Amino acid sequence: MAHLSQTNFTSVCLINHSCATESHIAFCGLLITRVFFILQILSKDQIKSICRAIIESGKQYARRKRKPFPLMYSYYGTEYLGAAHGLSSVLQMLLSYQDVLSGAEKDLVWQSVDFLMTQEQNCNWPAELGAIIERENELVHWCHGAPGVAYLFAKAYLINKKPQYLDTCIRSGELVWEKGLLKKGPGICHGVAGSAYVFLLLYRLTGNSKYLYRAQRFAEFIFTEEFKAGSLSVTSVCSLFEGLSGTVCFLVDLLQPDQSEFPLFSVFV
């Protein structure tokens, strides 16, 4: 822990903006780990410093690029919005630690949440800021699109109970029911299990058994000959996000839907 305690998180974040806010590899990844595993790997002061660094980085980028909203980030030059690389997961992690934020910092985060809601296009979100969704090439993945962005609005709803956030999650679920049987494998990043996790999320948010039924139907589809024939083969078999490990997590969560959580992406704690 000594090296962590001596780290100036704000300086590191501002020096390497392109990767410092990417949810899998840097500061948001540290926050995700602490939320999911309930590990005391960071002190409250360190968490506050990380959150402040992430917010300051987003402020500076938005100001430099003259964005009409308070926080924005880029990953290797692209302003992603989705859960794997984009704005939605950064905001979700900041909401998870809003108890360490100042009033002004909370305002910036909530303004950004509401901005992201305005980017919805027919119940979905483009992969990157400013893009127009082409219906024939629409991405309905956890990594890019409604199946991942929904978790941000679920977290927002759990915090302040404003119905517009829950309504956004429900619209996302309807899109997934219509278009979420993907051909990129069974995984949770851009596969069928990742889409189906939205139904388990909605089941926990609403208690409506309709969503559990839909999750079960998606699970059944994974084992059909139609899926096996039309789906891309899994190359990283053991990968949590792109392989079968995440799919197994989803199938286990079907057995305990009241405790289900997308791996490493908790909104209920």
Image (cartoon, helix red, strand yellow):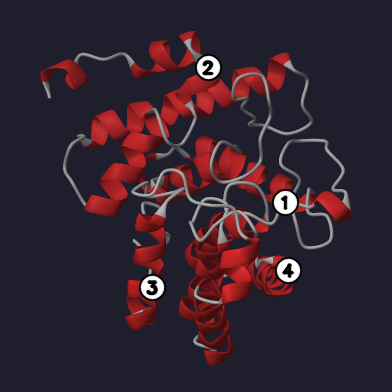
Classify mark 4: helix, strand or loop.
Answer: helix
Q: CA distance from mark 3 to mark 1?
A: 23 Å
- The reply to whether residue 146 is in sight is yes
Please state the total of marks drawn on the protein image: 4
What amino acid does circle 4 point to?
A: Leu
Q: Is residue 266 visible?
A: no
- Residue occupying image coordinates x 66% and y 19%: 77
Q: For mark 1, what is the residue?
A: 139
Disc 3 crowd rating (10 Å Cα; few below 14, some 14-19, many 20+) is some
Sequence-earlier tag: 4 or 2: 2
Classify 10 Å Cα crowding around label 2: few (below 14), some (14-19), many (20 and above).
Answer: many
Which mark is first along the chain, 3 or 4?
4
Q: Amino acid at mark 2?
A: His
Give the residue number, with chain letter if any, for mark 4.
175
Residue 134: x and y in percent read 88, 49
Q: Is residue 151 left or right of residue 4?
A: right
In this rendering, the answer to whether 222 lies above or below 55 is below
Quadrant hosting residue 63: top right
**Residue drawn at (42%, 39%) of the image:** 101
Q: Which residue is mark 2?
A: 17
174 is higher (above) or lower (below) than 76? below
Q: Quick one: which residue is furthest to the bottom in this view?
A: 209
